[in-house]
Image (cartoon, grey):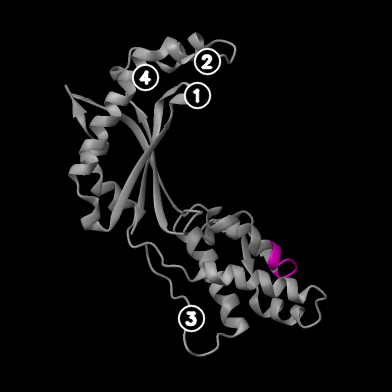
């Protein structure tokens, strides 16, 4: 993803205007690079609250010209309003919180680079069929340490499982789920995941400054979907 210029802490005092400009640039960065806008603890939502009365809402053609951004924020307007705002101290605290989030390291890798790097896994074939039927890659900042991450939502090819999704739902019946009736398909699911996991480990992600984890929802009877999570280190 392209890097946008943003402010970092330095020995000199950062002005309030610079902090607000840094916040706006992070907001624009999230939307320009299709990063989950709820990243960083609902960053976009908090910006819209902070800039209430000092923003315009993008609609129609405007929103397509502004990279799908829902709002445009006016820094000078907010600075002027703060002078007489009875909630000034509260807003200054919110600005500090948003500013700290706005100066975290940006993504080092693009979505396309991650897709290319994981290509041997995402296109892995066994007996001529791809194990992963489809996938979707989404960048986001995680909530714990605000590191740049990618979530790869994967769907397994039903050819490798003894039941399809409709059969599983029918067998579960009326929302009741007893795992003992799904032992065979669960074993098949984890067998596929182990193979995928081993192929990811062969890529030596640490050399590329990445680490991965995998999760799934088999406890809910969802034997076709799992996530590969990539975190930049």
| Residue situated furthest front in the rendering | 180
Foreground residue, 17 or 143? 143
232 left or right of 79 in image: left
| Position above or below: 127 against 180 | below
212 left or right of 71 in image: left
Please indicate, yes or no, whether residue 57 appears anywhere in the rendered image. no
The N terminus: image quadrant: bottom left
Instruction: Indicate the secondary structure of the residue bearing disc 2.
Output: loop
Residue 148 image position (x, y, % from top left)? 41, 58
Residue 220's disc number: 1
Residue 186's disc number: 4
Please indicate, yes or no, whether residue 169 appears anywhere in the rendered image. yes
Please give the residue where the numbered disc 2 appears in the rendered image: 177
Q: Residue 40 is drawn in which quadrant?
A: bottom right
Instruction: Indicate the secondary structure of the residue bearing disc 1.
Output: helix
**Circles 2 and 1: CB atoms closer than 8 Å:** yes
């Amino acid at each position: 993803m392209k890097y946008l210029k943003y402010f970092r802490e330095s020995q000199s005092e950062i002005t309030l205007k610079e902090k607000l400009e840094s916040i706006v640039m992070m907001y624009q960065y999230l939307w320009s690079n299709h990063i989950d806008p709820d990243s960083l603890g609902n960053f976009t939502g908090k910006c819209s609250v902070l800039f209430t009365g000092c923003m315009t809402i993008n609609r129609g053609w405007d929103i397509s010209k502004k990279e799908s951004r829902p709002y445009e924020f006016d820094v000078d307007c907010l600075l002027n309003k703060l002078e007489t705002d009875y909630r000034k101290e509260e807003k200054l605290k919110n600005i500090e919180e948003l500013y700290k989030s706005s100066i975290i390291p940006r993504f080092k890798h693009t979505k396309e680079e991650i897709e290319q790097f994981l290509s041997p896994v995402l296109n892995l074939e066994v007996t001529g069929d791809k194990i992963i039927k489809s996938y979707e890659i989404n960048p986001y900042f995680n909530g714990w340490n605000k590191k740049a991450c990618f979530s790869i939502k994967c769907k397994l090819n039903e050819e490798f499982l003894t039941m399809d999704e409709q059969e599983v739902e029918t067998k579960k019946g009326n929302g009741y789920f007893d795992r003992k009736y799904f032992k065979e398909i669960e074993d098949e699911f984890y067998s596929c995941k182990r193979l995928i996991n081993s192929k990811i480990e062969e890529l030596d992600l640490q050399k590329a400054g990445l680490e991965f984890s995998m999760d799934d929802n088999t406890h809910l009877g969802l034997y076709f979907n799992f996530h590969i999570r990539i975190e930049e280190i």
